[in-house]
Amino acid sequence: MTTLEEAWDDRRLGIALMNRLGAFGRGGRVDARVAAAMFEVAPDTVRRWIRQGVPRGRVAQLRELLMPPAAVLEQERRDLANAREALWDISGRGVPVAEEWRKNGWLKPHALAIVSFGNRQLCTARLGLVGGARTMARLQGDGGEIVEIEEFRNRFAAVVARLELLEDLGPWRVSLPNGALKRGHTQAWLAAAPRPTLEELRRHPKVKIPVTKPRRRKTDE
């Protein structure tokens, strides 16, 4: 698995700092003066970290600044477990399906999209009901561009795929300031990150759950 140092290599630390601190400099680079003030170092020191790598003594501090808080990651783990449990319910092997799910349209097909923000050099994953210009507009909000999209059988399957993706992207993630994006400011990652396709996530979830209700066994009379 990629380490933080590897994810921040090749000047990508500058992209993460630029987005986390709102320190947008010229030519799509970080304004080193803003980052330097945060760490109480000289701007040239920040530039050296970006060019040559992060000193071991600064890794923990940078992780705390740039990555999603522990509480966010813990909530994602709970949401993933709950979404998987919902899929078991839908398959007929758990509790009856909640009527609220039907009313909210959560049992209908949902689209999961990878949305790229070129000016930020980041991506995020967004989901919505399949079909309609309104859904596409919401997915592309904040000036994003859809670079990949896949249809899932219901909202919970799409949620599982998104959260498994975020789990795999770990070191590449960047937590943006509140309000930087209308949706998903804690779910962004560096655009250069290697990742599975959405089709792979749909076809090969980490926990295999039946799609349909099991057939009843015939009994001898």
Image (cartoon, grey):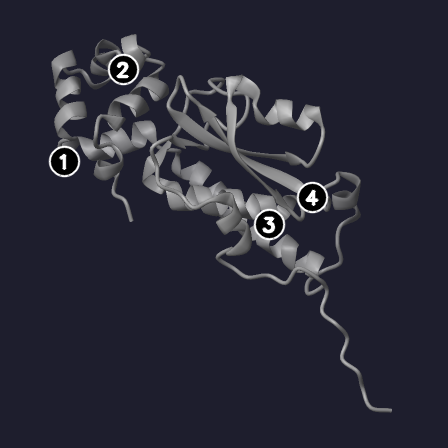
Q: Residue at x 75, y 54 (%)?
A: 97
The label nearer to you, 3 versus 4, is 4
Disc number for residue 109: 4
Q: Which residue is mark 1?
A: 56
Q: Nearer the viewer, mark 4 or mark 2?
A: 4
Q: How far separated are the C-alphas under marks 4 and 2?
A: 40 Å
Residues tagged 1 and 3 counted as in contact (Cβ below 8 A): no
Residue for badge 2: 30
In the rendered image, the residue lying farthest to the right is 221
Ranked by sequence position, the earlier of labels 4 and 2 is 2
Q: Does the rendering let one see residue 11? A: yes
Classify mark 1: helix, strand or loop.
Answer: helix
Left or right relative to 25: residue 112:
right
- Name the image quarter holding the C terminus: bottom right
Element class at badge 2: loop
Residue 189, how many percent across, how many down? 39, 32
Residue 209: image location, x then y, percent:
59, 61
Q: Earlier in the sequence, mark 4 or mark 1?
A: 1
Q: Which of the 4 quarters of the picture holds residue 129?
A: top right
